[in-house]
Image (cartoon, coloured by chain):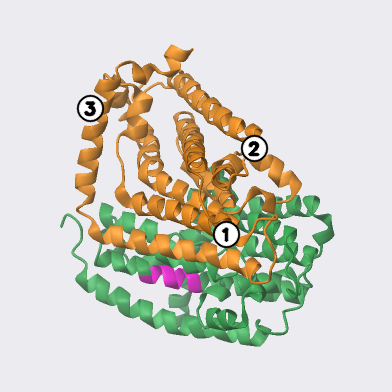
Chain colours: A orange, B green
Amino acid sequence: MVVWLLAPLRDLRRHLVSLRRFWGTSLASQLEYQFNAFIELLAMVGNLAGSLLVLWLFDRQGVPLGGWSWAGALVVLGAYTVLTGFTSCLLQPNLSRIVTHVQEGTLDFVLLKPIDSQFWLSLRTVSAAGVPEMVLGVVLMVGAALQERGSLNPAAVLLMAAMLMAAALTLYALWFVLATTSIWFVKTWNATEVLRAVLTAGRYPVAAFPPALRTLFTLVLPVAFLTTVPAEALLERATAPWIGGSVAVACGALAISRAFWQLALRFYTSASS
Amino acid sequence: MTWTMHVLGRARRHAVLWSVQFAYMAEYRAEIALWALSGVVPFIMLAIWQSAPLPGLGLDGPMLGRYFLSAFVVRQFTVVWVVWQFEEDTIQGRLSPYLLQPLHPLWRYVAAHQAEQATRLPFVMLIIATFFLLQPAALAFPSPPRLLLGVLAVGLAFAINFLLQSLIACLCFWSERATALERLLMIPTLFLSGLVAPLQAFPPGLARLALKTPFPYLIAFPAQLLSGDPLPVEGGFTVVGGFLAMALWIAVLLPLLSLLWRAGVRRYGAMGA
């Protein structure tokens, strides 16, 4: 089981060398489009301003969202911003191509490569567009946490980083499973748009939702583990069950994504047959 | 005589165009259903607004429910994707034959959008029914004249949004990446239109500023009409004032689009020619 899960790690060095080549070439080609980068930056600022506006509409009337203070809610928004940046860095550019590979039959070439296919499909390119967003998200989290608590405990920062990693892995697994369904239903790209829309709920602490939705966002769609738990970790409010749960969800989601990919490949009949 | 022939010919051409587009869209029912679901943001926001009621908002729980349900419905019938379609048609060189036909290419897109809206209708009905099952307290229907005004406002909102997006689509004549600019337009469309927060919750200065832009007429005004609840007394719209403003925006945007289109076609080099 473990060997199968960690198959890409078996020859780690070869995968790392490949990764450096992959990312070097994709970054070089993106430098061609500076105008796009400028627009991305503007869009990031605009989106953040909009989210702040919504939070402020509650704060200016003194209504706390699910018992979270203004600064606390900002930490959650910061975590959301980090994950959006991560999505535009890795998930969007790579996983949106799986559909195209299936449609155009180029998935056959990927499967023939002497490298793990899930690794190749998930990490083939990287986009610099999300980096400013990730940086801004971290700055927002740290700044707001300082405002809330006055000082930061290094252990809390480390725990927050670990929780964000777990969140990123969970998010990756969700996207990857949805993208994998395109092996059966070629046109499921819209499903990721649904996921993206539902995940906007992560802009707000999960306590801001009514109980039924809170359960949904914890057990079915792990929105709570994506943004609220990392924020709680930084604010030193995270309890052991939530921390353990976050790690378990990440590991489980990753294992499911791996198993689901293997299953999908068994059903894949290639483009011309 | 010739004039009536001309009008009849034109009407027939549109009927054919519309039915072709409808047949095409009906093939993509499953995707359109997913697409309809990706408009869940108003429901997520509704959960937040109902859990943290603001003092002095003038909207109680069921009214909030009807407002955000209406906002969802309005959004479903005013979504415009002409920029992506147009960008693809320009890059792939499909635009050149369209330009040779005796029909303005933009009409083709209008027909495609309307056909897609017709395909959405059953899903939207289903979602409305589900909503009232989950929130029976909110169950109320607008009076027939109010409904008629609401539908008219939705149509005009679609017109304004289509004109706005087509202006951006025209920029494809100059740059191949107009979708980046569409991302920017999406930000005020999300935050100033009333999709995530009712305009009544805005501080008066910001609400006045928003009303000077076309965005509240895309969602908030038609949604308030459709909800069937009385229009807010202050800081909101009057029926006559709202429709006048919509007519004004169309009167401004239509000639602008016509000018930009002509300039663009003159500049159009046709890919590969």
3D distance between C-alphas at marks 2 and 3? 39 Å
Secondary element type, mark 3:
helix
Residue A239: mark? 2
3D distance between C-alphas at marks 3 and 1? 42 Å
Choose between A55 and B42: the one closer to the eye: A55
Q: Position of residue A144 (x, y in %)?
A: 52, 57
Callout 1 and callout 2 share a chain:
yes
Q: Position of residue B189 (x, y in %)?
A: 50, 67
Residue neighbourhood size for the residue with mark 3, other residues' Cα within 10 Å, grouped as few (<14), some (14–19), many (≥20): few
3D distance between C-alphas at marks 1 and 2? 20 Å
Which residue is identified by label 1? A71
Give the magenta-colored segment's residue range: B160-167
Which residue is identified by label 3? A17
Specify the amino acid type for callout 1.
Answer: Ala
Q: Quadrant of residue B3?
A: bottom left
In this rendering, which labeled residue sits more in front, label 3 or label 1?
1
Q: Quadrant of residue A105?
A: top left
Choose between A2 and B15: the one closer to the eye: A2
Instruction: Point out the tag, 2 or 3, that comes first from the N-terminus.
Output: 3
Callout 3 and callout 1 share a chain:
yes
